[in-house]
Structure formats: C-alpha cells, structure tokens
C-alpha cells in the first residue's frame, strides 16, 4: 500500500491516501477531545486498516489510551468529556447518538493493560459474553469456549482445568484467557491497551505470537510503550505526541526513515 505525505501538514504527518482503499475499518477525521478544559486529543485524522496490526506509540500522557477508548466509546464513561469530529466504523459514524454503543462493543473487543479475568471459572469467563447475547444451549457454549481458547492458543494448557477459577492461572495465561473471552463474542476489531506491560518476557512473547496469528482474522489496534514490540508485530505505526498524530506510516518506514524530527528523537530514545 502506497503511503503519501499530506502536503498540507507535511512536517507533521505521514498520511495514508484513503481515496482508493476500501478496506478501512476505522476512519477518524479531525477528532478533538477535551477532559474539562484539557484538550487531550487535537485534530486526529487516522485511517485504520482491516486485518492489520496498527501500533500507537508515544510518551506517557500523549493521548494514546484516550484515543483507543474513543474507538469503542469507553471514554464517555469519564465525567466531563467532550468530543468533536468524526469516527467512522465501517462507514458508520459511531459518535452519532443513534449508533448503539452495545452494538459497537459486540464488534469491537478490548484487552486491558492488566489481565482482568472475572472471579469465575475459566469456562464461565469465556461463556460470559455469549450468554449475555442470549446463548444458553450448553453444547453451543461448549463449542464456543473450546474454539475461543484454541483461538487464543491456550486450550491445551487449560482444557482439563475449565472448572477452576481463572485467578489460579499465571499472569500470562490470564491475559490469554482475557483475549479468548474477547474472541468468544466474535468481534471484528480487537483493541489492546498495553496488553503485555504487566507480563514477564516469556509471556510477552506468547502474546505477541498470538497477535501475529490473530491478525489473519481480526483488525488489531495496540497501544504500546515498547517500541521494539511495535516494530516486531505491527504493520502500521502512529506516533502520538501531546495529543497529536505526529507521523503515521508503514512500521518499517516509520522506524527506518521517519519524516519528522520528533519521531526520530522519540524512537532513538532522546526523549520519552
């Protein structure tokens, strides 16, 4: 896919020409967000492509997680939040109040920074979403649970422990249970907010390998402080700074030949 510099703002943003692309899953246009009087996101324009891993990098407090939470409207749970601009999911404006947030969250799953399994059995963790959506048949639930655990590449580790509490698993296993729980509702997009930051290196590697496999079927957007991780697993990378997208490009392009000096300074460790 050819990347083009937006000449209107060439010193800040390596933009993607979306005019000929039909595989955009999210299209953010001139998004602004305020927490009270704090302008947290500033004129974000960012297309996200399906069945790719898009990494969002940048220093703490730059708006990465805030942006991620706009994509499933979780940010609305914060008091005093205001937004302007457009976020389209599959061509539909999700900030339009007629767009049901419940419908959005069946299509867009989320995995958080720290593993957060429910205080239930492994089986009940995975079956929770399907049950909420009205599936009661045990045979169907059994099939969903196995398929989801296999999809998260943890079935062989837990297949004989399905009735045990998920809290008994290691941190890395718990995170993959959370990913399996996300897969159980058959989402289109998976949002990941620093999904390996609380994990040891071995568990981190397993989750990264899982992300590589999942992108064959899902569009994945991952916030990460770990630039090596972004370079290893993502197809595209957006660099955020002070609530703005400074640069957005193919990952290998952004890391090898950044257009903006601030991007270069960040990825080479001069600040962050």
Image: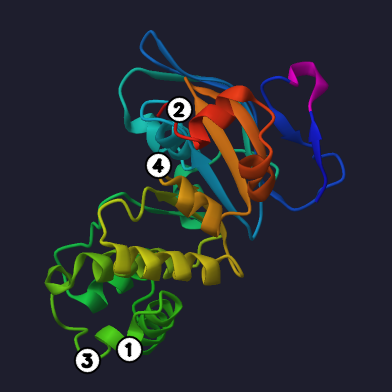
- Mark 2 and mark 3: span between their CA atoms? 49 Å
Q: Give the prevailing secondary structure in the magenta stretch.
A: helix
Q: Which mark is residue 160?
A: 3
| Residue at numbered disc 1 | 156
Q: Nearer the viewer, mark 2 or mark 3?
A: 2
The answer for how far apart the CA atoms under marks 4 and 2 are is 14 Å
Mark 1 to mark 2 CA distance (whole Å): 44 Å
Residue 53 versus residue 217 in the image, above or below: above
Secondary structure beneath dot 2 equals: loop
> Which residue of the protein is positioned furthest toward the right in this rendering?
20
Mark earlier in primary sequence (4, 1):
1
Q: Nearer the viewer, residue 14 or 156?
A: 14
Give the magenta part as a residue range: 6-10
Q: Secondary structure at mark 1?
A: helix
Q: Quadrant of residue 81?
A: top left
Is 213 left, or right, of 167 in this rendering?
right
Disc 3 and disc 1 in contact, CB within 8 angstroms: no
**Residue 192 coordinates in the image, percent (x, y):** 42, 51
- Element type at marker 4? loop
Look at 51% across and 41% down and name the residue there.
56
Residue identified by numbered label 4: 225
Nearest to the eye among marks 4 and 1: give it.
Answer: 4
Q: Is residue 8 visible?
A: yes
């Amino acid at each position: 896919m050819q990347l083009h510099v937006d000449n209107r703002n060439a010193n800040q943003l390596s933009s993607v020409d979306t005019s000929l692309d039909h595989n955009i899953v999210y299209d953010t246009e001139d998004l602004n967000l305020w927490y009270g009087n704090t302008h947290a996101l500033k004129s974000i324009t960012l297309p996200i492509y399906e069945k790719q891993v898009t990494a969002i990098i940048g220093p703490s407090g730059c708006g990465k997680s805030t942006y991620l939470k706009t994509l499933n409207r979780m940010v609305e749970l914060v008091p005093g939040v205001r937004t302007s601009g457009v976020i389209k999911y599959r061509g539909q404006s999700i900030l339009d109040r007629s767009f049901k947030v419940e419908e959005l969250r069946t299509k867009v799953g989320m995995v958080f920074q720290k593993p957060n399994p429910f205080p239930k059995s492994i089986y009940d963790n995975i079956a929770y979403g399907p049950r909420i959506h009205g599936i009661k048949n045990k045979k169907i639930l059994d099939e969903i649970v196995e398929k989801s655990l296999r999809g998260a590449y943890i079935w062989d580790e837990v297949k004989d422990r399905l009735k045990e509490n998920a809290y008994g698993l290691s941190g890395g296993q718990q995170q993959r249970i959370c990913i399996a729980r996300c897969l159980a509702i058959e989402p289109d997009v998976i949002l990941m907010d620093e999904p390996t930051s609380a994990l040891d290196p071995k568990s981190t590697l397993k989750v990264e390998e899982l992300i590589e496999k999942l992108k064959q079927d899902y569009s994945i957007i991952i916030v990460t402080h770990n630039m090596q991780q972004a370079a290893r697993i993502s197809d595209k990378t957006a660099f955020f700074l002070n609530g703005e997208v400074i640069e957005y490009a193919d990952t290998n392009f952004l890391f090898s030949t950044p257009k903006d000096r601030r991007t270069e300074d960040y990825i080479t460790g001069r600040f962050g």
